[in-house]
Amino acid sequence: MALQGMAGGAVKFLLVTAALFVVLAGIKVAATLLVPFLLSAFIAIICNPLVTKAAHYKIPKPIAVIFVIVIFVSIALSLAGLVGNSLNELSQLIPVYRAQLQEQFIWLTQQLDSYNIVISPELLIEYFDPGAAMGLAANMLSGLGGVMANLFLIIITVIFMLFEASTVSHKLHLALDDPQARIKQIDQFLASVNNYLAIKTLVSIATGICVSVMLWAFGLDFYLLWGVLAFLLNYIPNIGSIIAAVPAMSLAVLQLGPAAAGFIGLGYLTINTVMGNVVEPRYLGRGLGLSTLVVFISLIFWGWLLGTVGMLLSVPLTMIIKIALENSAEGRWFAVLLSSEESSEGSSEGSREGATE
C-alpha cells in the first residue's frame, strides 16, 4: 500500500509538471496575443477605482468609463509623443556620447601611465560603455512602444473590462460549487489585487515625477525620458530603481561630470528610499512583500515568457499569484516561500494571533 501511495504521488507530480510545461509553452507561443490582453487587464484594474468612485456620485457608468478612457488616452498619447521624440534624439546622439567617452578614457589612461599603470582605452570602453546602457533603456521603451501600437485593441478591451468589472465577483460566486464558503475569500483576493496595483501605480507616478524634476533641476538632457523609465521600473522593487538610475547617471558623467553624476545617484537613492521604505509600507503594509531573489527570478522568467512588457509587469503578475496563494489553504505554504523575511514573519504572527483568538 505504501509503495502504491508513493507511485501515485510520483505520477501526480509528473502529470502536474508536464501540464505546467505545456501551459508555459502555450503562453510562449501565444505571447503576441496575451501581452496586449495582460496590458489591458493591468490598465483596467488601475482605472476601475475611478469608475467605482464616480458611481458614488450618481454618475452613469458609460459616462464614467468614457471619461476615464479619454483621460488615459490623452495622457498616453502625450507621453508617447514626448518619449518618442526623446528616443529619436537619444539614438542619434549615442555615437557622440561614445566618442566623448573615448576621449575621456584616453585622457584617463594617459594620467595612469604617469604612475606606471598601463590600461588600454579600448578595454575600458568595452567594460564600461554608458552608450550601451542608454541604448538598452531606449530599446526597452521602444519595445513597449511596439506593444502600444495595438492601442485601439487595448482601449476596446479596457472598455469592455471596465463594464464587466462589477460583475466579476458575482460570476465567480455563481461558478463555484460552494459560493458561501468562497465568497469572502474571492472578495479579499480581488480587493488585495486592486489595492496593490492602484497604490503601486500612484507611488510609481510620484517616483517618475520626482526623478524628472530632479534631473531637470540638474539640467540633464532627456529628463522626461528618464522619469518615464523610473515610473515603469518602479514596479520592480529593489532592482528596478538601480536599473533606472544607470542610464541617467551614465549620461550625467558625460554631460555634467562625475561629481554631478554622484549627486544624481544620491538623489535617486533618496527618492527610492523614501518611496520604498516610507510611503509604500504606510499604504500597502508589510504583508505584500516579495523576497529580492523572487523579484530577480520573476524578472527573468516573465521577461523570457512575455518580453519587455513581461519584465515591466513581472512583479505585479507575481504579486497576483502570491495573493491568490495566500487566499488558498493548499497554496499558503508556497506564498510564504515567495515572501520577504519581514512579511513572512508578519503573516506568521497574524496567523498565531488568529489561532489564539
Image (spheres, rainbow, N blue to C red):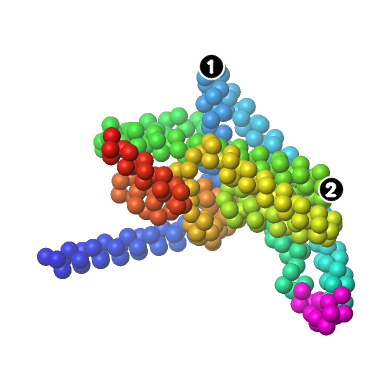
Q: Quadrant of residue 346?
A: top left
* 2 or 1: mark nearer the eye: 2
Quadrant, the C terminus: top left
Left or right side of 124 for 330: left
SS for callout 2: loop
Looking at the picture, how far across and down is residue 87, in whole percent?
Answer: 76, 53
- Counting residues from the N terminus, which is met first, the one under dot 2 or under dot 1? 1
Which is nearer the eye, 61 or 33? 61
Note whether 22 is above or below 220 in the view shown. Answer: below
Amino acid type at image mark 2: Gly
Q: What residue sits 67% from the left and 53% below the top?
A: 244
User: Would you say 205 lies left or right of 347 here?
Assistant: right
> Closest to the observer: 254 or 317?
254
Identify the residue shown where x is 70% and y is 58%: 246
The image position of residue 259, as x and y in percent, is 81, 57
Task: Indicate whether 29 appears above or below 273.
Answer: below
- What are the residue bounds of the magenta stretch? 111-124
Residue at 57% across / 51% down in the picture? 237
Amino acid beneath label 1: Lys
Number of residue marks: 2
Disc 1 designates what residue? Answer: 58
Element carrying mark 1:
loop
Residue 240 in percent (x, y) is at 61, 53
* Residue 202 place in picture, x, y as percent: 61, 37
Task: From the image, tell me which residue sits under label 2.
Answer: 219
Label 2 to label 1: alpha-carbon separation? 46 Å
The answer to whether any part of residue 218 appears in the image is yes
Tell me what residue is drawn at x 25 percent, y 66 percent.
10
